[in-house]
Amino acid sequence: MNKKLITVSEAAQLLSLSVDTIRRWDKKGLIKASRGNNNQRFFDLSELKRAQIKYKGGSTTNNYKMLKTNKKTDISTIELFAGAGGLALGLENAGLEHKLLVEIDKDAWSTLKLNRPKWNAICEDAQKIDFKPFKNKVSIVTGGFPCQAFSFAGKKLGFEDARGTLFYSLARAVKEINPKIAIGENVRGLLNHENGRTLNAMLDIMDELGYRVMTRVLRAQYLDVPQKRERLIIMCVRKDLKIPFIFPKEKNYTISLREALANVPESDGQKYPPNKKKILNKIPPGGYWRDLPDSLQREYMGASYFMGGGKTGMARRLSWDEPSLTLTCSPAQKQTERCHPEETRPLNVREYARIQSFPDSWIFSGSMSSQYKQIGNAVPVNMGFHLGKCLIAMLEGTFDPKTMEYVEKCATKSTNSETRQLDLVLE
């Protein structure tokens, strides 16, 4: 009982749970497992006890909150591809100051101006902006660039070879501004894009520009976000500076959809056509198409019924007792259904925003489909907060081991295998 980490068998015996239950919680991302030298899974007993109380219906605590500090810093940032402001708001809540935000989409830019009229947010293509006036005047440059493939044939994969991609705009901004830290943000899939060559090209470019680089996959459900969402963070530190790499430390809890959507304001949302609603009416909370009778499975799935793969996103109803699945740009897409746990309808706009940890006061501009898209593409605000606190710690030397992880090892230039190994070690 005094051991902090225990095996799944020991946990099952101590808590009178089945081994399958604990493994199911682990698979669903409701608890975290640590790996031993022989790849055996170990669990934190106190974390398991919290999970047992929570998922057996014995907890009334609501851990959902908007994270914000009252302490402001004079550390300045510039953000490219700012979207609806998820990362920008999270960094502001952590205490950072924005000098410039760039967003080409008019609705998303309008959202930024509507909610933060004092932000210097411009609606423009990042490729057309001259960043030289900010040279050595801004500490941090960030950008959640859409992933575009490089053309590898006959290329050396240097800075100039990235021209025409949106990553090039971020790299050019870094070259012209010369910040102390640069952050690139993308989907986890970038790790394996073109067998890792795309990411390695990006790491080589940042090395060419004079930056040490570390990658890390952040898991939102362990960073005060009620959503199973993974984002790849490319953290770059200028080589002439003795600045450590610091990443958010994952929490020992998750936030359920029930906690997140408590007293959520009413709002507009998409609706199902009658035939689809008839099908989804038969899906239990946490269930999907496999929970239908075989005849209805065949009717709903069509040709997909005979194809391989679990297709677990189809006819999917969310569960009250778990974090949401990753939000997409539309809650009613057949392949990635996001049906309300209780009512037979897609999640609405304000529910989407809550799950991304936007405050209820954050208003989204544009059509309903545009609002869903803005929210679905955003960095969760609370994840941005945790990242922002780490950036401040890196620059101010205020490392907090309770909430942050200090990483000494880093990569400057990296082969595909090294990049993957780093990420697996650090995750």
Image (cartoon, grey):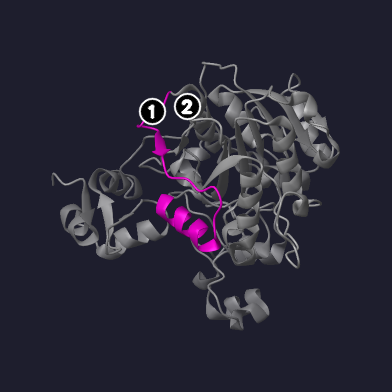
Element marked by disc 1: loop
The amino acid pointed to by label 2 is: Ala
Q: Which badge, 1 or 2, is on the more N-terminal residue?
A: 2
Q: Quadrant of residue 309?
A: bottom right
- Side (left or right) of 138 relative to 121: left
- Side (left or right) of 264 relative to 276: left
Query: For the point 37% across and 42% down, which residue is it?
Result: 253
| Mark carried by residue 103 | none
Q: Quadrant of residue 62?
A: top left
The amino acid pointed to by label 1 is: Asp
- Please check the rendered image and state whether residue 29 is part of the magenta-colored stretch, yes or no: no
- 71 vs 344: above or below: above
Query: For the point 49% across and 22% down, which residue is it?
Result: 396
- Please check the rendered image and state whether residue 410 is part of the magenta-colored stretch, yes or no: yes
119, 14: nearer the viewer: 119
Q: Position of residue 386 (x, y in %)?
A: 50, 33
**Magenta span covers which residues?**
398-427
Is any part of residue 178 visible from this angle? yes
Query: For the point 57% across and 55% down, which residue is it?
Result: 188
Residue placed under numbered mark 2 in the picture: 393
Q: Position of residue 312 (x, y in %)?
A: 54, 67
Q: Position of residue 233 (x, y in %)?
A: 56, 45
Element marked by disc 2: helix
Answer yes or no: do the residues labelled 1 and 2 have beta carbons within 8 Å?
yes
| Mark carried by residue 400 | 1
